[in-house]
Amino acid sequence: MKNNFNAIDLFAGCGGLSKGFMNAGFNIIVGVDNDQAALDTFVKNHDGAVALKADLSLQETFDKIKEIAGERQIDVIIAGPPCQGFSLTGPRNFDDERNKLYLAVIEMVKQYQPKAFIIENVPGMATLYKGQIKDEILKRFKKMGYNIDCKILCAADYGVPQIRKRLIFMGIREDIGEPKFPEAMFTPETYRTCRDAISDLPDLKNGIGSDESEYSQEPITEYQKLMRGNCTVLHNHLGTNHTQMVKDTIALVPEGGNYKDLPPGWGESRKFHMAWTRLNGNAPARTVDTGHRNLFHYEYNRIPTVRESARMQSFPDDFIFMGTKTQQSRQVGNAVPPLLGQALGESILKIISGDGK
């Protein structure tokens, strides 16, 4: 059910974080990114939202967002800015040009003064330069009148069938309240598994399938029912036509295993910690990445389809990915899982509506 609060999504990608906020009841006004295929996906799956392809380091982009918002108040800003620049510049050069996109988010909050904001990043940012980058971010937002905290959250704790950790900054304007992160809903003993997530999807044993197809069986688990909703057409479940060598190699890897389980002389083309990794059907997935070339299905000798990866990221089946299969895979791998986004959105909603004090 929608509430009266509006949000904008910066560095939105396909919109996993904002999809979660939509599910929590927020109205998404605009998603900003520089990837056209991701924005095509965003606009298809966010009713009424505008997809804006723009450079967030430019003032004209700020002005365009204001124009799109019109009379509507921007209550919440959510963002996932790239932080690679900090690795190069260090804490003493925080305002370096290479950090301009991260600085744009800080400037956006300064200009719009939203009630709350969420910034997500890789966990390593918490300890980068012994935590000095993280501390500088906290200090700058505090100077702007925000109570702010940060915490590394694991998506599996919120019902996502995947071990995916993200550093989350939560800021609440001082006149409104204090940040409060959502409580974990699942424990390692109750985590949803790969099998819970995708065992109802067609196996594609007799071909690679098609971009639109039919379900081959009824949903088995509660999670599968949640993901299907009222969806009757299966989208983005298109297999990969592997070479015989790849099929023969992965066939030698046991469930939950990797390249270390291969006999001598096999799999020489890929030797790093994630190479030739077969998912464990009875555990959450490893972190779904943008390449999708190293994680293989727990039962079948192929990589997961875009839809299977999307399920492991908690995208519902009616969330349709646009672009080429490679672009779709990148969108899924770059996204914040919607169920994690929803948990954050519900926490923010309680605080800014006065229910969380």
Image: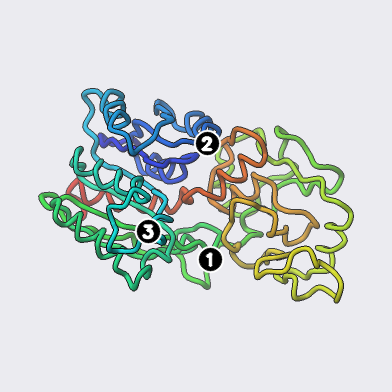
Which one is nearer the viewer's eye here, 160 or 304? 304
Identify the disc placed on residue 296: none
Q: Is residue 216 visible?
A: yes
The residue nearer to you, when weighing 51 against 352, is 51
Amino acid at the residue labelled 2: Ala
Horizontal side, residue 298 vs residue 96: left or right: right
- Mark toward the start of the polypeptide (2 vs 3): 2
- Where is residue 306 drawn, in percent x and y? 65, 45
Residue labelled with disc 2: 38
Tell me the residue at 52%/49% (across/down).
334
Tell which tag, 3 or 1, sits nearer the viewer: 3
Answer left or right for 137 relative to 10: left
The residue indicated by pointer 3 is 86
Q: Are marks 3 and 1 in contact (CB under 8 Å)?
A: no
The amino acid sitting under disc 1 is: Tyr
Residue drawn at point x = 52 percent, y = 68 percent: 190
CA neighbours of label 1 inside 10 A, class few (<14), some (14 to 19), many (20+): many
Q: Residues within 10 Å of mark 2 (few under 14, many from 20)?
A: many
The residue carrying mark 1 is 191
